[in-house]
């Protein structure tokens, strides 16, 4: 299983970035996909998630600014980030989760997002 993130980088406050995560080795369409982030000295936190049926959830801190979406035909999940703030600076991780009688939980290697003031 591989989750490969792309799209991170350095952007000024108020700018936008689009993160992508391409999955391989899983039946992508049945997995809940999510983006987490971890800033230096802080715990990893959920940014947004999208279920296999397309239902979404996002942290209060990003509501109205970030949008998660998925393309099952391309095994890819995106995170569109607008109106970025310096406090959004973190390493962003892609997560794939499937739970029934067994639990399947996979992580990408992370991509750095830095927002300058």
Image (spheres, helix red, strand yellow):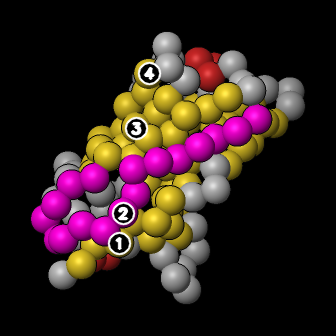
Callout 2 touching callout 1 (CB < 8 Å): yes
**116 shown above or below 10:** below
Residue located at (72% from left, 25% from top): 26
Callout 3 touching callout 1 (CB < 8 Å): no
Callout 2 touching callout 3 (CB < 8 Å): no
**73 shown above or below 90:** above
How far across and how far down the image is residue 112, in percent?
Answer: 46, 66
Q: Is residue 20 visible?
A: yes
Disc 1 or 4, which lies upstream in sequence? 4
- Alpha-carbon span between mark 3 and mark 1: 18 Å
**67 shown above or below 50:** below
Disc 3 or 1, which lies upstream in sequence? 3
> Which residue lies under the disc numbered 2?
9
How far across and how far down the image is residue 70, in percent?
Answer: 43, 27
Task: Classify the position of the N terminus by image quarter.
Answer: top right
Task: List the single residue furthest toward the right.
Answer: 102
> Which residue lies under the disc numbered 4?
71
Identify the disc placed on residue 114. 1
Q: Is residue 63 visible?
A: no
Q: Tell me the SS state at disc 2.
A: strand
Q: Mark 2 or 3, which is nearer the eye? A: 2
Displayed quadrant of residue 104: top right
Disc 2 or 1, which lies upstream in sequence? 2
Disc 2 or 3, which lies upstream in sequence? 2
- Closer to us: 109 or 36: 109
Q: Is 61 placed left or right of 4 in the picture?
A: left
Identify the disc placed on residue 78. 3
Q: Mark 2 or 1, which is nearer the eye? A: 2
Callout 1 touching callout 4 (CB < 8 Å): no
Q: Which residues are magenta?
A: 1-17
Callout 4 touching callout 2 (CB < 8 Å): no
């Amino acid at each position: 299983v591989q989750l490969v993130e792309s799209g991170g980088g350095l952007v000024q406050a108020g700018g936008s970035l689009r993160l992508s995560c391409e999955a391989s080795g899983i039946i992508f369409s049945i997995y809940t996909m999510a983006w987490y982030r971890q800033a230096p000295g802080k715990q990893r936190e959920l940014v947004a998630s999208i279920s296999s049926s397309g239902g979404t959830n996002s942290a209060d801190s990003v509501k109205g600014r970030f949008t998660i979406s998925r393309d099952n035909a391309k095994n890819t999940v995106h995170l569109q980030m607008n109106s970025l703030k310096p406090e959004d600076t973190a390493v962003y991780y892609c997560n794939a989760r499937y739970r029934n009688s067994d639990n399947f939980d996979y992580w990408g290697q992370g991509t750095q997002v830095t927002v300058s003031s």
